[in-house]
Amino acid sequence: MSLIIRPVGVFDLSACHAHLYRHSLENGTSGNLIHAPFAGPREGTLEEFSKGLTQSLQKTPAEVSWERQWGLFDGSEIRGTIQLRHSPRVEASLHRALMAMGIERDFRGQGWGGKLLQAALDWARSEPTLAWGGARIFFVSTA
């Protein structure tokens, strides 16, 4: 198995949607923590998912509602993602981003979370419109 981390682009949306669906099935089951405020599989069609994310990925960090994602790729499949998204989505907060990360159970505990985090932080630090003075990161462990 050869895993790589790279940015998620609009051509990866089907794989990203499939990852989010698989990951949502783990939500609060078989010893997994509840990591999203819903139970059961993620709802929504690929078309609905793709429309919003395509628009956000194509925006620059100087535009309201921008988003960037990096994926843990296992061939053409995504097994984990980290997202930076403009939040709150108003012009006065363009210097801020919300970070979210999810890794499928079989790929946890192997250091991939730290590598995804590093990819996102490296990109963010290179963006002149983002400020990184007061970030808070919370970790939840099942161990």
Image (cartoon, rainbow, N blue to C red):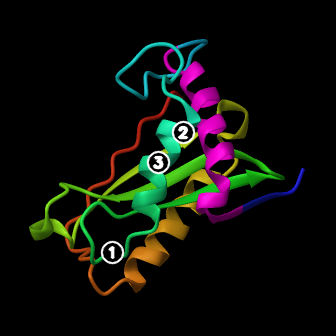
Mark 2–mark 3 CB contact (< 8 Å): yes
Residue in the foreground of this view, choosing between 57 and 135: 57
Q: What residue is disc 3 on?
A: 51
Q: CA distance from mark 2 to mark 3?
A: 6 Å
User: Can residue 103 be seen by looking at this rendering?
Assistant: yes
Q: Nearer the viewer, mark 1 or mark 2?
A: 2
On screen, residue 95 versus residue 48, left or right, reads left
Q: Position of residue 101 (x, y in %)?
A: 48, 47
- The first of marks 1 and 3 along the sequence is 3
Question: The C terminus is located in which quarter?
Answer: top right
On screen, residue 122 versus residue 108, left or right, reads left
Residue visible at 47% across and 76% down?
123
Residue in the foreground of this view, choosing between 73 and 112: 73
State which quadrant residue 21 falls in.
top right
Q: Given the image, on which type of amino acid does mark 3 rest? A: Lys
26 over 81 or under it: above or below:
above
Mark 2 residue element = helix
The disc placed on residue 61 is: 1
Residue visible at 40% across and 27% down?
36
- The first of marks 1 and 2 along the sequence is 2
Q: CA distance from mark 1 to mark 3?
A: 19 Å
The disc placed on residue 47 is: 2
Q: Categorize mark 2 by other alpha carbons within 10 Å: few (<14), some (14-19), many (20+).
A: few
8 over 107 or under it: above or below:
below
Question: Is residue 119 magenta-colored?
Answer: no
Q: Position of residue 52 (x, y in %)?
A: 41, 48
Q: Which residues are magenta?
A: 5-28
100 over 47 or under it: above or below:
below
57 over 81 or under it: above or below:
below
